[in-house]
Every structure is written in structure tokens, then in C-alpha cells.
Image (spheres, helix red, strand yellow):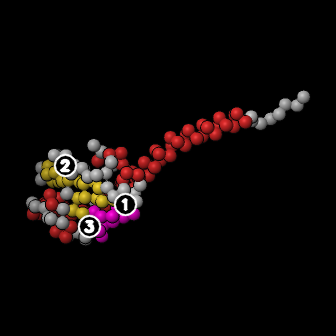
């Protein structure tokens, strides 16, 4: 009698079940990763605004009311693929507003960067000391230096 080669139906079903379980775990992790990558774009777009706020503060010791006071274009003009606006405001706060199609619960959310004066220079944090300016972006999507 000749022995057959190949897999039985049960063996194939077990392999498919294992692949399904791996996909169930991997897909949400990958989606969170892609949203975090999109959120990081906002941190890069704030470089010019941080510089403008720092320069105004170092030369005058005060903060302006909006982007034009810092010599920046309108908030809606500073944008990217995932960012709809970057606005600088009173107290030097910079608000990053993300697009409404970012993904997950990050749609349309914000991150607020707050300057703190340390020995005459500005140090940027993603919150103020009172804990009131942390924006609306869920913690799992924030860059590591902005997570609560």
C-alpha cells in the first residue's frame, strides 16, 4: 500500500486558525503604529513656530497673541499631510491640530506645546504645570516625550 503525501484537512485548518489569531493581534498594533507616525509629523511642523516664539521671547521678554505677532504665516498655512493647523498663541503655547481623517480616535485632536522659562531659555513641554494644556490627543498616539 502506497502512503499518501501532503497535509490532512485538520492540519490545514489549524494553520489557518493560527494565521487568523496572529492577524487579529497584529492588525490593531499596526494601525496604532501608523497613526503615531502621522502624529509625529506635527512635532516636525512646529520647529519654525518654536523658533519664532523663542526669538520673540528672548528679544522682548513677552509673548504675542497669535501667529502674525510671531512673524509666522496663518495657522492654516502651516499644514501637512496629517496636520490641518499649527497655531502659536498667548503664553507662547503652540497648538497642533490634526486632520479629521487621521484614523482611530485621533481624528481632529490636538497637542499643545507649552514653553517654560529655565534660566532665560525656553524649554518645551507638552503640558503646563497646572495640567490644563495637554490637548485632546489620546496618550497612546502621542510622541514619547508627550505621553502623560
- Dividing the picture into quadrants, the one containing residue 112 is bottom left
Dot placed on the residue nearer the N-terminal end, 2 or 1: 1
Observer-nearest of 107 and 94: 107
Q: Of the residues tagged 1 and 3, which is closer to the observer?
A: 1
| Residue found at the far left of this picture | 61
- Pointer 3 local density, CA inside 10 Å: few below 14, some 14–19, many at least 20: many
Q: Disc 2 marks which residue?
A: 132
Question: Does residue 28 appear to the left or right of 129 in the view shown?
Answer: right
User: Mark number for residue 100?
Assistant: 1
Q: Alpha carbon of mark 2 to alpha carbon of mark 3: how far? A: 21 Å
Q: Are marks 2 and 1 in contact (CB under 8 Å)?
A: no
User: Mark number for residue 75?
Assistant: 3
Observer-nearest of 34 and 21: 21
Residue displayed at 83% across by 33% down: 4
Q: Are marks 2 and 3 in contact (CB under 8 Å)?
A: no
Residue displayed at 25% across by 71% down: 73
Residue 3: percent from left, percent from top: 84, 31
Q: Alpha carbon of mark 2 to alpha carbon of mark 1: how far? A: 23 Å
Question: Does residue 101 appear to the left or right of 68 in the view shown?
Answer: right
Dot placed on the residue nearer the N-terminal end, 1 or 3: 3
Q: Quarter of the image for the C terminus: give it.
A: top left
Helix, strand or loop under label 3 = helix
Magenta run includes residue 138: no
User: Mark number for residue 134?
Assistant: none
- Dividing the picture into quadrants, the one containing residue 76 is bottom left
Stretch in magenta: 76-86
Observer-nearest of 108 and 146: 108
Q: Quarter of the image for the N terminus: give it.
A: top right
Q: Does residue 44 appear in the picture of this structure?
A: no
Residue displayed at 9% across by 60% down: 61
Helix, strand or loop under label 1 = loop
Residue 86: percent from left, percent from top: 28, 63
Amino acid at each position: 500500500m502506497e502512503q499518501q503525501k501532503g497535509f490532512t484537512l485538520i492540519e490545514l485548518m489549524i494553520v489557518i486558525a493560527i494565521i487568523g489569531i496572529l492577524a487579529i493581534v497584529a492588525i490593531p498594533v499596526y494601525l496604532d503604529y501608523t497613526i503615531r507616525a502621522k502624529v509625529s509629523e506635527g512635532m516636525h511642523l512646529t520647529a519654525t513656530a518654536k523658533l519664532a516664539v523663542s526669538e520673540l521671547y528672548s528679544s522682548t521678554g513677552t509673548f504675542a497673541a497669535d501667529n502674525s505677532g510671531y512673524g509666522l504665516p496663518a495657522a492654516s498655512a502651516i499644514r501637512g499631510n496629517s496636520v490641518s493647523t499649527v497655531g502659536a498663541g498667548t503664553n507662547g503655547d503652540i497648538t497642533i491640530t490634526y486632520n479629521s481623517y487621521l484614523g482611530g480616535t485621533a481624528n481632529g485632536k490636538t497637542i499643545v506645546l507649552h514653553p517654560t522659562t529655565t534660566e532665560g531659555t525656553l524649554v518645551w513641554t507638552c503640558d503646563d504645570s497646572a495640567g490644563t494644556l495637554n490637548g485632546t490627543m489620546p496618550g497612546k498616539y502621542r510622541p514619547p516625550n508627550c505621553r502623560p
